[in-house]
């Protein structure tokens, strides 16, 4: 592969890479030429499905099991990763969701979701971003959400975190864009993953969602691959501070 989308010789760190959207992002980046550092709370450091897929694309893979609810563990992981060599692309995708009406939503659930979906992503961006700034180039991509724009139902912690991600993208971009480091986000629409299984299983909610999506279908994790490669590549060198919806037209309604 050659051209502005060629990632040969670069290393991408992808969190939440063991399944779903993170898995698809890691594979897409590998197929574009990048070596992959994959991390998730359930990652098998060797022999995982994502490692097999990355290896099948002809790229190197390093796997790490990291509890993103543990801030100290995230810091140790980031320090170790940058000590091993440059991280050219950081994909902040690890996340979780906990559902309960706001009036009864446990504070512990709210705090856990913010820690995993926002605070740990800032910690990773800060540690990896420092090295990117030293090198004068880098790509940071967050997984935002439709709930970076909307309020959602029964997910106050998730909405607060994803709204925070949108603000963090802009804040980091303002500071780092002039130093060769772009910071953007992808906002997936309703993607058929474990996180949305409860919605898929709810006949009324699923029907209402499909009726709102102009594309007429739930998204697949692989639908995020092209946007990820674009934002990681030289083709996007003048794109920063942006949140790119990949939502089948949901936000256009």
Image (tube, rainbow, N blue to C red):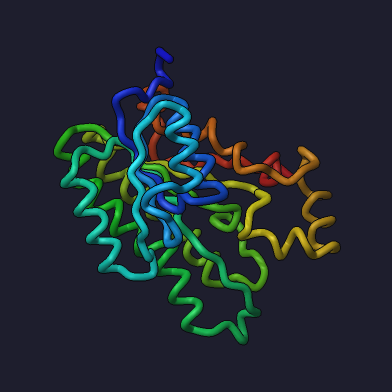
Whether residue 155 is visible here, answered yes or no, is yes
Residue lying farthest front? 47
The residue shown at (65%, 79%) is 101
Where residue 208 sits in the image (x, y, percent)? 82, 57
Whether residue 230 is visible here, answered yes or no, is no
Residue 174 shown left or right of residue 50 in the figure: left
The residue closer to the viewer here, 212 or 195, is 195
The residue shown at (33%, 44%) is 62
Where residue 26 sits in the image (x, y, percent)? 46, 39
The residue closer to the viewer here, 183 or 108, is 108
Classify the position of the N terminus by image quarter. top left
Residue 185, relative to residue 59: is it above or below?
A: below
The residue shown at (44%, 25%) is 32
Residue 173 shown left or right of residue 131 in the figure: right
The residue shown at (80%, 49%) is 210
The residue closer to the viewer here, 200 or 153, is 200
The residue closer to the viewer here, 123 or 242, is 123
Classify the position of the C terminus by image quarter. top right
């Amino acid at each position: 592969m050659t051209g502005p989308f060629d990632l040969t010789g670069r290393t991408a760190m992808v969190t939440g890479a063991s399944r779903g959207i993170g898995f698809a992002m890691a594979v897409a980046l590998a197929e574009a030429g990048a070596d992959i550092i994959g991390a998730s709370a359930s990652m098998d450091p060797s022999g995982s499905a994502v490692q097999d897929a990355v290896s099948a694309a002809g790229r190197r893979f390093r796997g790490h099991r990291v509890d993103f609810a543990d801030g100290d563990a995230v810091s140790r992981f980031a320090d170790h990763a940058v000590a091993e060599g440059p991280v050219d692309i950081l994909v902040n995708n690890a996340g979780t969701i906990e559902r309960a009406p706001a009036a009864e939503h446990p504070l512990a659930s709210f705090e856990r979701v913010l820690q995993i979906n926002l605070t740990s992503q800032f910690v990773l961006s800060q540690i990896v971003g420092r090295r990117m700034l030293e090198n004068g180039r880098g790509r940071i991509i967050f997984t935002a959400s439709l709930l970076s724009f909307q309020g959602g139902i029964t997910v106050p912690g998730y909405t607060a975190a994803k709204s925070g991600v949108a603000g963090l993208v802009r804040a980091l971009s303002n500071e780092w864009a002039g130093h060769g480091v772009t910071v953007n986000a992808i906002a997936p629409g309703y993607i058929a993953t474990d996180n949305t299984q409860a919605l898929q299983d709810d006949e009324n909610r699923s029907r209402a969602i499909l009726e709102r999506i102009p594309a007429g279908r739930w998204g697949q994790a692989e639908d995020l691959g092209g946007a990820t490669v674009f934002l990681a590549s030289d083709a996007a060198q003048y794109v920063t501070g942006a949140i790119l919806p990949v939502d089948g037209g949901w936000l256009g309604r």
